[in-house]
Structure formats: C-alpha cells, structure tokens
Image: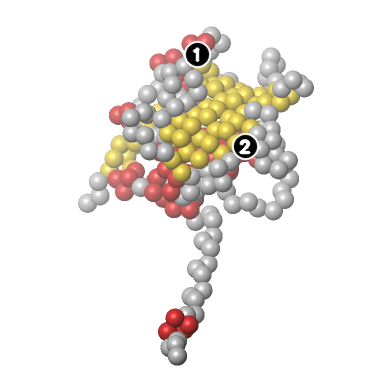
C-alpha cells in the first residue's frame, strides 16, 4: 500500500511564494562544488563558487532583498550582480543559478531574454516598456538609456506599494544568457508544488492565484531535491581516474 501526501499546486508560479531555499543552496554546494561558511548562530547563508568569482548571499532581512548574487570581472566580462526579494520563487531563481553553473559550451548566439516571455504570451503594454504577463501581474523591463543598462522584474497585484509581491534586479553587464535562464523559468506555465500546510499567499494576491490540492505518492514528494542534485551533478563529466603509478622499485633495490 502506497502512502500519499497532500500537495498544493500553485499557478501562476510567480505567485507561489518563495519556497524552500534548499532548492538552490543544496545543489550549489553538493552538485556544483560551492563552499559555505559555518556559523550556526545567524540565519544567513553565504556560498562561494569554486573559482571564488561568484558569491551568493541569502540573508532574510525584513526590508532588503533576501538573495544577492555578485560576480567578479573575468576577462572582458565586467562585474555584475543580481538580487531577488523574499517571495521570489526559488524555482525561478534556479533558472539563473542552474544556467550559471552549467558546463561551458562553445560559442552560441546571445539570447534575447524577452523571447521566452513572448513565446508564453507576454505582451507589450501601453504605459510601460518591456513585457507583461497575460494576467497583468508580472512585468519585465530592460532599461537601456545610457545611464542604465539593467533589467527589472516587478510582480505586483495593484499600483500601490502594498500590492508588491516581489522584485528582481539584474545589474548592467549581467550576461544575457543568465537573464534568459531566469525568464524561461518565469515564463514556464507549470504550477509550482507547495506544502498546503505551509502555504503563505498574501491576502491581497489570493484572488489572482489558483491553488489545486492534490495527492502524490510520498516517495515523489520526499526526493525531488535529491533528484535535482543528481541531475545537476550529472551535467559535468567526471574527470577520468588517474592511471595507476608503476611500482617504485628504487626503494626496494638493495644497496651494496
């Protein structure tokens, strides 16, 4: 007999709430080799990439972005940073971090971060640049006016400050393929699973949110993070084991 567990499927995904930060931090550490400090007295996580060029900071501050990722300059690529508010779903942030940690491929055309949104039906609006989701709630804008060359995402259910759900910011020089990884995850129309007993949807956004309660086998609910770690670890080919060294006969040679 299989045990089933209640699951809430939330759509649109950008209103699903932040989710479990481990969805990002655990694969970065276990599958991608990012290191972390050990300070159990504060609810802050700092992860650094193996090459020490990228630093991810998760800091649950009440009035500041919870997620900040900074990257040092590399060659002709200048330094850049991104930030995400607390209610940004981790599955959407992972669109960027998974792209960042993917094995380097050969030269590819620079992607248009707007393209995944257009394919999902996001539209131009009359009073703003950029693209807005079909329900009018989430808006992505590239500001390139000489003084700024940054990307902004606002998810809000009304025009007043109380209606804001979350914001994301991509500084100038953030690589376009990383922003496109984020917009692909943002445009995905697959509902996000959440624990129905810990579902935290703000009251002012509930009427815009569709929650379907269902049941799934306990094994499917228990291991998605483990499966995700394995999938990301398998992206990078393991280096071949070093050939065995021939026996050192010198140390066994008898001296006269």
Q: Which mark is residue 72?
A: 2
Q: Is residue 221 above or below residue 84?
A: below
Give the secondary structure at mark 1. helix
Q: Nearer the viewer, residue 115 or 85?
A: 85
Give the secondary structure at mark 2. loop
Residue drawn at x 25%, y 49% is 2
Q: Residue furthest right?
A: 146
Q: Position of residue 70 (x, y in %)?
A: 57, 33
Q: Position of residue 120 (x, y in %)?
A: 61, 34
Would residue 156 be seen by someone viewing this image from the given angle?
yes
Residue drawn at x 42%, y 25% is 60
Q: Sequence-wise, which precedes: disc 1 or disc 2?
A: 2
Would residue 16 be seen by someone viewing this image from the given angle?
no
Residue drawn at x 52%, y 10% is 161
Which quadrant of the figure has residue 26?
Answer: top left
Q: CA distance from mark 1 to mark 2?
A: 34 Å
Which quadrant of the figure has residue 114?
Answer: top right
Q: Residues within 10 Å of mark 2 (few under 14, many from 20)?
A: some
Q: Residues within 10 Å of mark 1 (few under 14, many from 20)?
A: some
Q: Is residue 39 left or right of residue 50?
A: left
Q: Which mark is residue 163?
A: 1
Q: Nearer the viewer, residue 71 or 109?
A: 71
């Amino acid at each position: 007999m299989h045990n089933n567990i209640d699951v809430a499927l939330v759509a649109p995904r950008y209103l699903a709430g932040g989710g479990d930060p481990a969805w990002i931090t655990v694969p970065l550490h276990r599958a991608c080799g990012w290191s972390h400090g050990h300070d159990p007295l504060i609810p802050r996580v700092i992860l650094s990439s193996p090459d020490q060029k990228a630093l991810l900071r998760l800091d649950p501050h009440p009035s500041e972005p919870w997620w900040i990722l900074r990257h040092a300059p590399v060659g002709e690529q200048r330094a850049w940073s991104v930030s995400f508010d607390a209610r940004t779903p981790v599955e959407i942030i992972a669109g960027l971090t998974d792209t960042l940690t993917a094995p380097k491929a050969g030269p590819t055309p620079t992607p248009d971060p707007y393209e995944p949104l257009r394919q999902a039906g996001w539209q131009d609006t009359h009073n703003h640049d950029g693209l807005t989701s079909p329900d009018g709630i989430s808006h992505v804008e590239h500001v390139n006016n000489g003084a700024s060359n940054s990307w902004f995402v606002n998810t809000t259910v009304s025009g007043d400050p109380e209606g804001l759900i979350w914001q994301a910011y991509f500084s100038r020089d953030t690589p376009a393929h990383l922003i496109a990884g984020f917009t692909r995850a943002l445009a995905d129309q697959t509902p996000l699973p959440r624990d129905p007993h810990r579902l935290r949807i703000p009251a002012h956004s509930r009427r815009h949110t569709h929650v379907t309660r269902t049941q799934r086998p306990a094994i499917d609910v228990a291991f998605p993070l483990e499966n995700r770690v394995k999938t990301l670890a398998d992206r990078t080919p393991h280096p071949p084991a070093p050939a065995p060294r021939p026996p050192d006969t010198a140390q066994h040679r008898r001296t006269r």
